[in-house]
Amino acid sequence: MTKSQQSTLRKFIDPLTDFGFKRIFGSEPNKDLLIDLLNGVFRGRKHIVDLVYNKNEYAGDTDEIGAVIFDLTCTASNGEQFIIEVQRSAQVNLKRRMLYYGSKLISDQAPKGKRKEWNYAISEVYVIVLMDGFGMPDGVGDGRCLHDICLCNRDTGKVFYDDLGFIYLELINFVKEESELETDLDGWLFVLKNMSRLDRIPLYLRKPIFEKLFNIAEYSKLTKEEKEMYDTGLKRKWDSKAILDHAVKEGAEQKSYTVVANLMQQLGLDDETAADVAEVSIDFVRKVRADLNKKKQ
């Protein structure tokens, strides 16, 4: 049975495919789902009561894996308005890409003329990133799932500017089981990571907002054309993951090769000791030694 055939046997779609993300969060009738998710992410700091979908994709980005973008104008309970961009991002150049998108949301607010009268009245801007299957770059994640970033003083840690924020949701670090869910944010993170593997609504999530979510996400309710679109997107996600996993494996093997070679050449360790120190197999060490001997000839 192919992966595509297996997908049709699952009750709910994967919300982190392009199709699934748009179907669940990307339309006016379902904006209450997105509002609830965003309010969970802000953890009480903001309370969104309404949002408007602006342009949903930037030209030139749609061919990139994980480039689904929601550009939103949100209204909070106190009447203030701010801009949020929600996206699932690829791993490459993550921090720079997010900085670019956040800066673009700011620069797009500038009027064509009368800049003096405008006086840089910039709305708050937040970029929220759903990181599916990979961690924060440079190992800065510290095992946390939610990373709430703003500009601060490097020496004191005091917030310098709080109206440009980056919130990263590192889903690989969310490991709570159904019985451990405590907050609405827990519920959303659990759903995002696990919904396509579930065959029922978890007891903790038996609330109207999540019941609506699971109803929309039922695979059997898709039309034939929608099922084809979803299966294609799911295969694309699997293919991308396979490519990434292969690249990570190659990188790890190259790192291990260098470590083993140094142990042999600089410390003169035998195969068994080198394998133990580098935490690799004895066969791997022997291949490295054979390759080094070949290079000497």
Image (cartoon, rainbow, N blue to C red):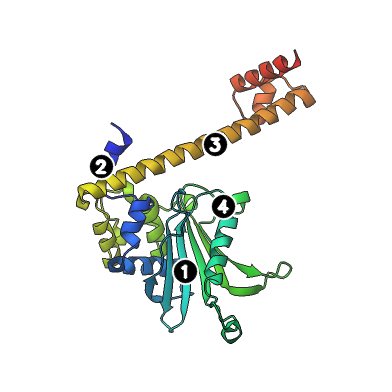
Residue 256: horizontal and vertical position, in percent? Answer: 64, 31
Q: Earlier in the sequence, mark 2 or mark 4?
A: 2
What separation in Å lies between label 1 and label 3 (alpha carbons)? Answer: 32 Å
The residue singled out by tag 1 in the image is 84
The crowding category of the residue bearing disc 2, from other C-alpha atoms within 10 Å (few below 14, some 14 to 19, many at least 20), is some
Q: Residue at x 22, y 51 (%)?
A: 222
Q: As shown in the figure, which amino acid type bears the numbered disc 4? A: Met
Going by the numbered disc 2, the residue's amino acid type is Thr
Q: Look at 30% across and 38% down and name the residue there.
A: 4
Q: Of the residues under marks 3 and 4, which one precedes in the sequence?
A: 4
- Left or right: 270, with 244 as reference point: right
Q: Secondary structure at mark 4?
A: loop
- Nearer the observer, disc 1 or disc 2? 1
Separation of marks 3 and 2 at Cα, in angstroms = 29 Å
Q: Disc 4 designates what residue?
A: 136
Viewer-nearest residue: 46 or 283:
46
Give the residue furthest to the bottom. Answer: 117
Circle 3 crowding by C-alpha within 10 Å: few under 14, some 14–19, many from 20: few
Check disc 2 and report the residue beneath it: 8
